[in-house]
Image (cartoon, rainbow, N blue to C red):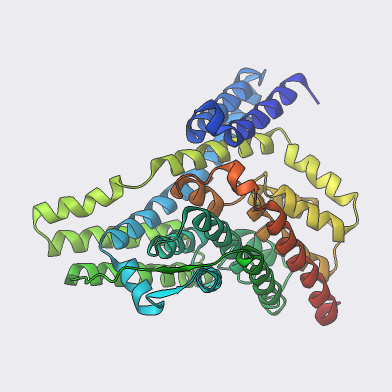
Amino acid sequence: MSVVHLLLIGLAILALLSIVFEEVIHVNKAKSTLFIGCFSWLILFFTAGSAEHQVDVGHALNENLLEIASLWLFLMSTMTFVAYLNAKGMIQSVVQTIFPQELSVRRLLFLVALFSLVLSAICDNVTATLVSLGLINAFNVPRDIKFKMAALVVFAVNSGGVALITGDVTTLMIFLAGHVSMVELVTLLIPSMLAVAILALLFAIGTSGRVSTTPVEFNFTRVDITITVIFFATILCTMLFNILFKVPPVLTFLTGLSLMFLVGRVSSTDTEQTKILEYIRQIEYDTLLFFLGILLIVGMLQEIHVLQQLAQWYMAIAPEYANYIAGVISALLDNVPLTAALLKANPTLSDQNWLGLTYAVGVGGSLLIIGSAAGIIVMSKVEGLSFGRYLRYLPALLIAYTSGYGLTLFLSGVFFG
């Protein structure tokens, strides 16, 4: 391994440390990761050597930026919808309709877990996370309990998507590679539900008291209802268009967002239209910048073949253990390029172990708050929930993850072994 590669790996470690010690160094994690991500790619260009290699690095950067742009635009569209619905009281109205006005903290924990799990199986992880956080914020939850519920949301959202090709990108990748079938994937719902229930039980230990939500009378306009319908129709069309016509989710959501603005233009005065457009400016751009920095760093690691090296190490270990470790590693590295590297290595695995890998890379990112899109959103949206605070929940998260992975191997061995 060259000195340059060691330097770049060192920068990636420095980026992780800047996130861990954000509260100590008082440097926003979005700014530190963005700088290190950009600086890493500059080093790749400076040390490329020949003009031909510089062109190759440029192509790699363009591919990385294309992936990031798709995620950025998708996040921006989703977060704009949710910001609008939240500001108009739509989310709180749904909570008041579905959930009791007052209930115990323990019951709320389980309801949040079930809500997040089901929602993530229906729509994308980003939307499920944002809506689930809106549910938590609708109740007067104490700060420490809110942190637990946020961690539960991250785990439940990641667990809910592994059993459906529309719920998680890595599940779709493994499915399209022909290693798992739809019937096999559905069985992952059982270990996912069990793991989420176990985590909710662990978090419920020692909790007491009751929480409530304040009833609010909302006067929704025709525009508000229309935009709500557009939002849910966009979620449904995102899944259908992707399955039937391979339309990228970002295109469908941008279409829905444009409809939102057109409805606002037709149905509102100039002043009201300006207010609708303001919701896009209320988005937490630190979240988007953090994503940008993280994905630039992961793209750099892929370019210097660190992920390929991990794939080689993977093949040297028994698959039952290698898959478990791959899930843990996905908490540090984005699970999409990691899964792509493993698929490229083309290991010979049984159906049981392919399902184990699907569960591991889909859920393992929940172990650290930076390991998944859901975690990064929660970290940016829940004030005070830092990397270190989330780390306190690692033992419980490991128990839930290990239980789910173990049950996945057992059930897949019984049904498909």
Quadrant, the N terminus:
top right
Give above or below for 147 relative to 176: above
- Residue 188 location, x and y as percent? 69, 73
Residue at the image position 90 percent from the left and 49 percent from the top: 316
Residue 187 sits in quarter: bottom right
Image location of residue 250, percent across then percent down: 44, 56
The residue that appears at 57% across and 56% down in the rendered structure is: 151
| Side (left or right) of 90 relative to 234 | left
Residue 100's place in the image compared with 148, above or below, is below
Judging depth in this view, the residue of 23 and 56 nearest the camera is: 23
Figure quadrant of residue 131? bottom left
Relative placement, left or right, of 155 versus 135 is right
Residue occupying image coordinates x 13% and y 56%: 272
- Residue 179 in sight here: no
Residue shown at 23% from the left, 48% from the top: 278
> Hey, which quadrant is residue 191 in on the image?
bottom right
Residue 279 vertical placement versus 309 (above, below): below
Give the left or right position of residue 7, taking residue 217 as reference: right
220 in relation to 183, above or below: above
